[in-house]
């Protein structure tokens, strides 16, 4: 059975930093791209970053580019999201998800497995 478990969320002041972690089990981690998504209260889920499975490519939504950094540690089946210069609009539940094939777009790709999420609250 596949599991993705996020951690590292919390309450932080605007301008602060958090590092989210996602640990995967039950799948060949190296074969999957891992994406981070967030859902703010009352809003649709937003794709914010992705790390490809093989060639080392990383992708970011414009809203987080330059502030967030995604990285992966295949030996530990983990992906991290370093979030700096946090803003109140970054508040939401953050999810990691695994995709077997990104296809032409990491944003609209089919993500096969999802974690339960970790909450981030950025106070102004």
Image: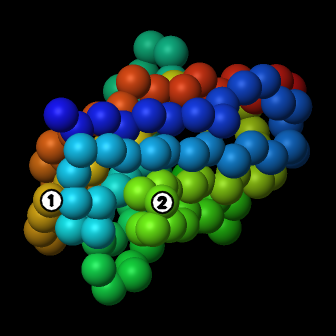
Please tell me in which quadrant of the rendered image residue 34 appears: bottom left
Q: Is residue 55 left or right of residue 99?
A: right
Label 2 secondary element: helix
Where is residue 41? Give x, y as percent.
Answer: 50, 15
Where is residue 10? Give x, y as percent.
Answer: 72, 26
Q: Residue at x 82, y 30 (%)?
A: 12
Crowd around label 2: few <14 · some 14–19 · many ≥20 (10 Å)? few
Q: Is residue 58 visible?
A: yes
Which label sits in the foreground, 2 or 1?
A: 2
The quarter in which the N terminus is drawn is: top left
Identify the residue under disc 1.
100
Q: Residue at x 30, y 35 (%)?
A: 3
Identify the residue under disc 2.
76
Q: Is residue 64 left or right of residue 100?
A: right
Tell which of 13 and 100 is nearer to you.
100
Where is residue 31? Give x, y as percent.
Answer: 21, 67
Tell which of 35 and 122 is nearer to you.
35
Q: Residue at x 32, y 44 (%)?
A: 25
Tell which of 119 and 3 is nearer to you.
3
């Amino acid at each position: 059975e596949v599991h993705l478990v996020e951690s590292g969320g919390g309450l932080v002041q605007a301008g602060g930093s958090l590092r989210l972690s996602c640990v995967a089990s039950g799948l060949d981690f190296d074969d999957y791209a891992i994406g981070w998504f967030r859902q703010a209260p009352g809003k649709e889920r937003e794709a914010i970053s992705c790390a490809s499975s093989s060639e080392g490519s990383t992708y970011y939504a414009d809203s987080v580019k330059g502030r967030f950094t995604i990285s992966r540690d295949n030996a530990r089946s983990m992906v991290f999201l370093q979030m700096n210069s946090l803003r109140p609009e970054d508040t939401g539940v953050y999810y990691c998800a695994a995709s077997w094939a990104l296809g032409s777009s990491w944003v609209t790709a089919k993500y096969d497995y999802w974690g339960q999420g970790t909450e981030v609250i950025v106070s102004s």
